[in-house]
Amino acid sequence: MANILNMIYAPLTDPTIILILNYFTNFFTCFGAIFVLVVNMVILESTIIFPVKRQNRYILLYGLLLLIGMIPFYVFKGVWIDEDLYAPRFNIYFLIYVIAFQASFVVIPIIYTSLKIYKSFETKALKKKWRYYFIGTLGAFSIPYLIWISNFVFKAWFRLIVGVYAISVILWGYLMYYGIGFKLKQ
């Protein structure tokens, strides 16, 4: 969803529309990560201990905190549109907020649960598969972090490097899928 919204506003020149679409782009970028944490929680605790109702409450609470928490930054110029390039720029406070929010609520818990799951596996084959998943997850998380830093730094050369690096999402997604999507051969 975030990538689609980003492609929609990329060619636009109306700062208000760009800002609104960028808000939702950042929201969906952060929001998608909660599902990785929920998958980890289900693997770690099972659906009996972490039932669907609890999963939905956690997802909803995270989404609401994110949705409401970003509003002041967009209202009070924590994010604005560069008048020359019609691209979003972040101030340091929004950059710190979005990185800290994402790290606190999903990235650190994902690392913690992933390591706990890894330690619970007894076979080398399962541990190997989980390492692929974990590396893919960390790689995938590196992309939005670099994009957010790019929107703060706002240098053409840095934006180009990040844009090229973002293509690696294919590799990270594949590693995640290979890690837990492929069948383990007997």
Image: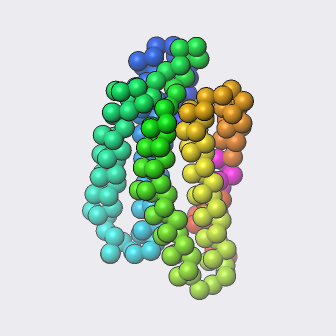
Q: Position of residue 41 (x, y in %)?
A: 42, 68
Classify residue 64 by image quadrant: top left
Q: Position of residue 38 (x, y in %)?
A: 42, 62
Give above or below for 122 relative to 17. below
* Total marks in image: 0
Report the predominant secondary structure element of the magenta stretch: helix
Magenta highlight on residue 103: no
Query: Does 63 sit left or right of 121 as displayed?
Result: left
One can see residue 30 in this view:
yes
Residue sitting at 59 percent across and 17 percent down?
A: 85
Residue sitting at 46 percent across and 13 percent down?
A: 14
Give above or below for 79 relative to 56. above
Query: Does 153 sit left or right of 109 as displayed?
Result: right
Query: Does 46 sit left or right of 82 as displayed?
Result: left
| Between 158 and 134, the one nearer to me in the picture | 158
One can see residue 1 in this view:
no
Residue sitting at 72 percent across and 30 percent down?
A: 157
Q: Residue furthest bottom?
A: 122
Q: Give the range drawn in magenta.
A: 169-174
Q: Which residue lies furthest to the front in this view?
A: 92
Classify residue 17 by image quadrant: top left
| Between 20 and 93, the one nearer to me in the picture | 93
In what quadrant of the picture does the C terminus appear? Answer: bottom right
Query: Does 74 sit left or right of 40 as displayed?
Result: left
Give above or below for 169 relative to 44. above
Name the colouring of the figure. Answer: rainbow
Give above or below for 23 relative to 44. above
Q: Position of residue 63 (x, y in %)?
A: 34, 47
Q: Where is residue 56 in the image (x, y as percent from the top left)?
A: 31, 57
Magenta highlight on residue 172: yes
